[in-house]
Image (cartoon, rainbow, N blue to C red):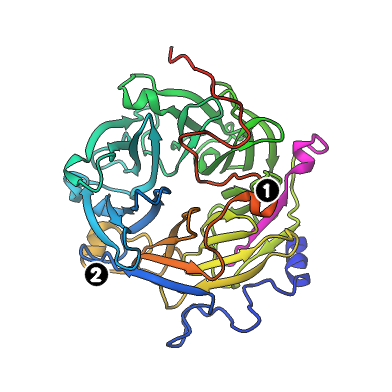
Amino acid sequence: MLRNVMLVLAAAPGLGGLLTAQQYNPNPAPGAQGSRNIRVVSHLPLSALGPYNVSDIEMEQELSRPYVYVDRTKGLAGFDIVSIKDPTRPHVIYSWRIENPELHRGNGSLAPTYVKHKGRYYFLNGFQFQAGGPDVDLGAIVWDVTGLPDTSKVKEIRRIVVPEHPGGFHETFSYKHSDGRALVIAQTVSPEAYIYDMEKVVTGDLNPVIGKAVNPNSAKPGPGSAWHDFYAGYDPATKQDKLYAAGGGGAFVYDITNPAEPRVIASITGVAGQPDAHTFTPTPDGRYAITMPLPTYQYGVARVFDLKPALDGQVKTVSRPIGAWTPSWQGAVHNFEVRWPYVFVSGQSDAFQVFNIMDPTNPYTVGFYVTRPGPYLHGSGIAGFAEQRAGGRSNSMYEGAWGIDVRNADGLIVISDYDSGFWALKMEGFDGWTGHRWGMPNISSVQDWDNGPEGAPTPRKVSLR
């Protein structure tokens, strides 16, 4: 089946990241760092505490709240809040670091997300710490950030611990459910994804978990049964809330209309070159999805799948992609933000990329910008905190553009680069996004916290008991 992926690649004239007028080069000549349709709005190095410690990123979507949360990884675990009130002059207005950072082991801060609930704004940040140091059972910390830009009003309100699954949260995703609840889905170091009700979280309820999505591959012992990335979205056609979960054994679509009883309704398994899934991001209508293998090995390609045969019950599982994309053969991309027909990519060593998926069988690159010029195998890799502080480095393809977010209101793109910090970019002709412009549901990773998902029924009152 991997041969079929190769055939798709070979048959697609625009594939492989080749542009008609410019070719992507990870180590570009001066003045050739990006395609002509990508403009740098600003760059903030974030290097005051040393390089090689920036991980994921989350941007608030309301123009009246110009705040971006940038996570700091390794021994400097914490986050910075960057103000983009003037996007050309970003600046850090608030920083937080874990207590006694030198004692902690592991990846640190990796999973930022935010929620608006009952008129207040909450920042939830996931952490992953390893045995041998403190906070091994810490999953996330929640702050009330309603008072920004007055940073004196930023208040920690809760620490979420998961002693039953030491190792914390690698990934979180916030979702406005069709029943009106604000939810956060979190990856635990286990086959279980926890679904948190933010009402219960912020009110101090001792049992804020209202559901668990269990990996169907859970019979397999060890990390091979665990989850990785998530996406949740409403399907107006079927009136279902759906969770797209990637991890050990493949990628799975759950019906979470009743969050207490998630059930698998489609899957992608048995894929050549992708026994496990790292990323699973659908199009606004939920028909197509883009995946990356887990781990994101060098030379791995992004695969495009048609979920319809599985969702319609025609097949038990989907195992063959209908298309594939890669900006180059040497690297491996990381995270996706889909704004049909564009897919915005943080590509690690493959930099920032944009490809068009209007024809899912023939995706093609439309823009790029190299946020970290240099060779593919570069930087500190999995070096520990002490090694980084001592200046030690080891080869890795996982550095570079780590996280990405897109603001639907004006099309601003933000990148967190493991080496070079924060970037704000714009793509020519992309000044905002709604699905209506493209004949699609107005569904993306962006949540309408006030009104709920498009096409959903009027939210009903849900008992917290």
Amino acid type shown at disc 1: Met
Please tell me which residue is depicted at 47% across the width and 27% down the height of the picture.
181
Please provide percent x and percent y for residue 458.
57, 25
Q: Earlier in the sequence, mark 2 or mark 1?
A: 2
* Residue 428 belongs to magenta span: no
Closest to the observer, 89 or 27 = 89
Please tell me which residue is depicted at 53% across the width and 35% down the height of the picture.
221
Label 1, secondary structure: give it.
loop
Label 2, secondary structure: give it.
loop
Q: Which residue is mark 1?
A: 440
Please tell me which residue is depicted at 33% across the width and 37% down the height of the picture.
122
Please provide percent x and percent y for residue 232.
56, 39
Q: Is residue 371 visible?
A: no
Question: Which residues are the magenta region?
Answer: 298-316
Q: Estimate how packed mark 2 is, as few (under 14), some (14 to 19) or many (20 or more) residues with alpha carbons within 10 Å.
A: few
* Residue 299 belongs to magenta span: yes
- Identify the image quadrant of the C terminus: top left
- Identify the image quadrant of the N terminus: bottom right
In-image side of 314 versus 136 (left or right): right
Please tell me which residue is depicted at 62% across the width and 67% down the height of the picture.
326
Q: Is residue 135 visible?
A: yes
